[in-house]
Amino acid sequence: NAGVTQTPKFQVLKTGQSMTLQCAQDMNHEYMSWYRQDPGMGLRLIHYSVGAGITDQGEVPNGYNVSRSTTEDFPLRLLSAAPSQTSVYFCASSLAVIHNEQFFGPGTRLTVL
Amino acid sequence: QQQVKQSPQSLIVQKGGISIINCAYENTAFDYFPWYQQFPGKGPALLIAIRPDVSEKKEGRFTISFNKSAKQFSLHIMDSQPGDSATYFCAARSDYKLSFGAGTTVTVRA
């Protein structure tokens, strides 16, 4: 099992550009989520999904879109990148909504100029 | 506004010493309290977790102490080793969502 994979590892964008951060898991997990990690702020939940076709907002959803067309994939879209979105982004998954352990991917470091 | 407040921001401990990290919360709907460990350049990984009906949980050198009435919980790392040098995050869950503390960077000096 590859676990949770994220691409790309690094990305530099200009203000106003759009892009999609990819996340995939091969563990047949129902629950998937996206976090951003900023210094001194821990990890903050952006969006999450409790199963294919179902998504919901987390703590900091503005400027981001998600979709969950398959169990395996949970892409995060930045519609019009802003410098405030410079961060490290982590995707995570867990077996089921009620399952406790979340498995995190290796992260994507995004810089918006 | 962070729902889980974590302290200290960083700490340095000698090899063999005890590291203590504290967290506090207000939301009584939280039903699960995990601790995650993160090494530089990696994603966080679950270290140990506790439910609010238990006052203490121990796994090897790691112990969570939980005080439900005070809405506080803490992580104790006994016999700290250089390999324990990492950033530790406490977290709390309600309604399918995890809220994380700001993190504590632990440095263990040999």
Image (cartoon, coloured by chain):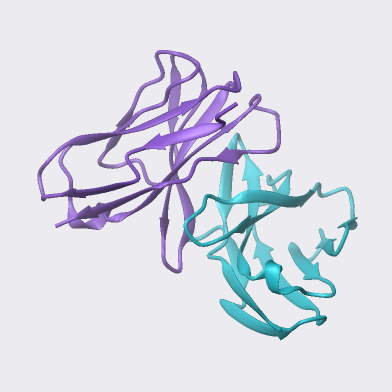
Give the x, y percent position of residue A5. 46, 34
Chain letter of the cyan region: B
Q: Is residue A78 visible?
A: no
Q: Is residue A8 left or right of residue A59?
A: left
Give the x, y percent position of residue A59. 44, 45
Between B98 and A16, the one lying in front of the other is: A16
Chain letter of the purple region: A
State the residue at coordinates (82%, 80%). B16
State the residue at coordinates (43%, 46%). A107
Location of residue A39 by image quarter: bottom left
Q: Is residue A83 left or right of residue B79?
A: left
Q: Is residue B18 visible?
A: yes
Between B24 and A36, the one lying in front of the other is: A36
Q: Is residue A78 left or right of residue B41?
A: left
Q: Image height check: is A22 above or below B4?
A: above
Between B38 and A65, the one lying in front of the other is: B38
